[in-house]
Amino acid sequence: MLKEKIGKYRWTICALLFFATTVNYLDRQVLSLLKPSLEEKFGWSNSDYADIAAVFQFTYAISMLFAGRIIDKLGTKKGFAWAISIWSIGAIVHALAIPIGEGMASILGWAGIVAVPVSVLGFMFGRAVLAFGEAGNFPGAIKATAEYFPKKERSFATGIFNSGANVGAILAPLTVPWIAKHWGWEAAFIIIGGVGFLWLFFWLFYYDKPEEQKRLSAAELAYINDDVEEQIPETKAKVPWLKLLEYKQTWAFAFGKFMTDGVWWFFLFWLPAYLKDQYGIVGTDIMLPLAVLYSLTMFGSIGGGWFPMYFIKKGYKPYDGRMRAMLMIAFIPLVVLAAQWLGGISYWLPVILIGIGASAHQAWSANLFTTVSDMFPKKATASVVGIGGMAGGIGGVLVTKVGGALFDHYKALGHIETGYTIMFAFCAVAYLIAWAVMKSLVPKYKPITDL
C-alpha cells in the first residue's frame, strides 16, 4: 500500500534514460556491423579500422570530462537535450564520410600534411562528432538517477537504464545489416541516426527537476529525498576538477573505468570482425549470433543492478554491499578464457561464453556507476562520472589500438586467432585487477561531505 501511495513517476524517468541509452548504442554500433563490408569496399586494414574506432574513443574520453561539467552547469534537462541532438547529427554525418573525407584531404594536402585515406578521414570526422555528443549520455543519466532515486534504488535503476546498451546492441544487428543490404550503407547511418530526434520530443515533455515536476506527488518526492546524507544543503558553488582529484574515491572510480571500459568497447567494436575472421560469418548472417550474444547481457545489467540490494538488506552500507557484489561479478568474465579453445566445436560456444562475459561487464558497470552517487553529493556526480568516463575512454583507445595491431600482425603470420586469444585473456582478468585496486583505495564506505 505504501508504494502505491508513494507513486511511480520516477520509473517513467528511468524509462526515458533506458531509451536514450538504447539509441546511444544503436548509433555507435552501426560502423562495427558494417566494418566487414566497408573494409572490402574501401580497402581498410585492421589498423585503419582501429584508427577510426580510436578517434571515437579518444574524443569520447576527452569529451566525457567536459560533458559531466557541462551537464552539472546546464542542468540535466538541457544538457541531455544538447547531447542527443549532437550525437544524432554525428551519426547521420557518417553517410557523408566520402565527400567530407575528400574535403579534409584537400585541406591537409594544402597544408603539406601527409593525409590518410579519404574514407578513413571521413569516418574519423563522423566518429568524432558522434563521440562528442554521446559523451553526455552517462553523466546525464547518472545525474538524473541521483535526482530521482534514493540511494537504495539507484543501482537497480542504473541497471535498468544501462540495459538499454544491451537492447541497442541487440537491435543494431537485427536492423543495420538489413537496411544496408536493401538501401545501402549510407541509409543505415541516416535512419538509425534519426531515431534520437524522436526521443528528444519525449524528454523535453516529461523531464523536469523533481522539485519542479508537477507530475510527481509530494509523497514520492519525500521518498526520493529520504536519504539522511542527502539532507546536507546543496550549494551552487562550482567544484573544481583538481578538488575532485584529491579524493581517493574519484581515483577508485576512474581506475575501475580505465581497466574495464575497454573490454566492453572491444566486444562492441570487434565482435563482427571476430565472427568474420574466424568463422566467415558476414552480412545478414551475423544478425542472429550477435542478437543472442547481446540478449545475454540484459540479464547482467538488470540482475547486476539488483544484486547489491541483497547485501544492503542484510545491513551493509550501499557502497560496501556494492563492492561485495562487484567482487563476485568480477570472477564471471574468466569464462571468456575458454572461448577460443572451444570454438573448434561450434561458433555458438564462443558466442555464448563471450555473451556471459559481456553480461558480467554490464552487471559490473551498473554497480560501478552507482558508487559515484553513493559517495559524492549530487552537484558533483556528473563531473566525477565525466572524469571516470575519460579514464575509461583512454583505456578503450589502448585496447582498440593494441587489438588492431595484434590482429594485423598475426593475420600476416596466418594465425589471427592468436591475436584474439591474447585480447580475450585481458578481457577475462581486467575486472579482478580493477576490483583489487578500487578496494585498496577505498576499503570502507566513506561519503564526501566537504564539497
Image (tube, helix red, strand yellow):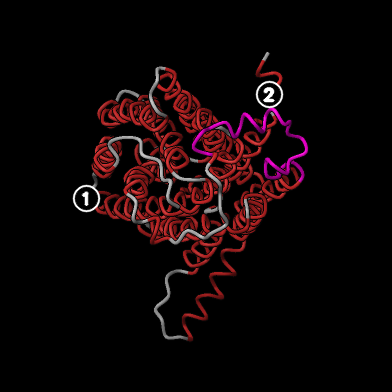
| 223 relative position to 434: left or right | right
Name the quadrant containing residue 323. top left
- Numbered circle sitting on residue 358: none
User: In the rendered image, which quarter is residue 313 located in?
Assistant: top left
Q: Image quadrant for the N terminus?
A: top right
The residue that mark 1 highlights is 413
- Seen in the picture, residue 302 relative to 430 is either above or below; the reply is above
In this rendering, does residue 287 appear at all?
A: no
- Which amino acid, by three-letter code, is at mark 2? Ile
Q: Considering the numbered disc 2 on the image, is that residue within a helix, a strand or a loop?
A: helix
Q: Residue at x 57, y 31 (%)?
A: 226
Q: Is residue 323 above or below residue 409?
A: above
- Residue position for label 2: 6
Distance from label 1 to label 2 (Cα)?
A: 64 Å
Q: Residue at the location (46% across, 58% down)? A: 65
Would residue 352 be seen by someone viewing this image from the given angle?
A: yes
Within-10-Å neighbours for mark 2: few <14, some 14–19, many 20+: some
Q: Position of residue 346 (x, y in %)?
A: 35, 24
Q: Is residue 269 left or right of residue 403?
A: right
Does dot 1 land on a helix, a strand or a loop?
Answer: loop
The image position of residue 439, as x and y in percent, is: 27, 37
Q: Amino acid at mark 1?
A: Leu
Q: Position of residue 173 (x, y in %)?
A: 54, 38
Left or right for 378, reference 436: right
Reply yes or no: does residue 213 show up in magenta: yes
The residue at the far top in this view is 1
Q: Residue at x 59, y 39 (%)?
A: 22
Residue range in magenta is: 205-230
Residue 210 drawn at (x, y percent): 68, 40
Magenta span has 125? no
Q: Residue at x 48, y 86 (%)?
A: 110
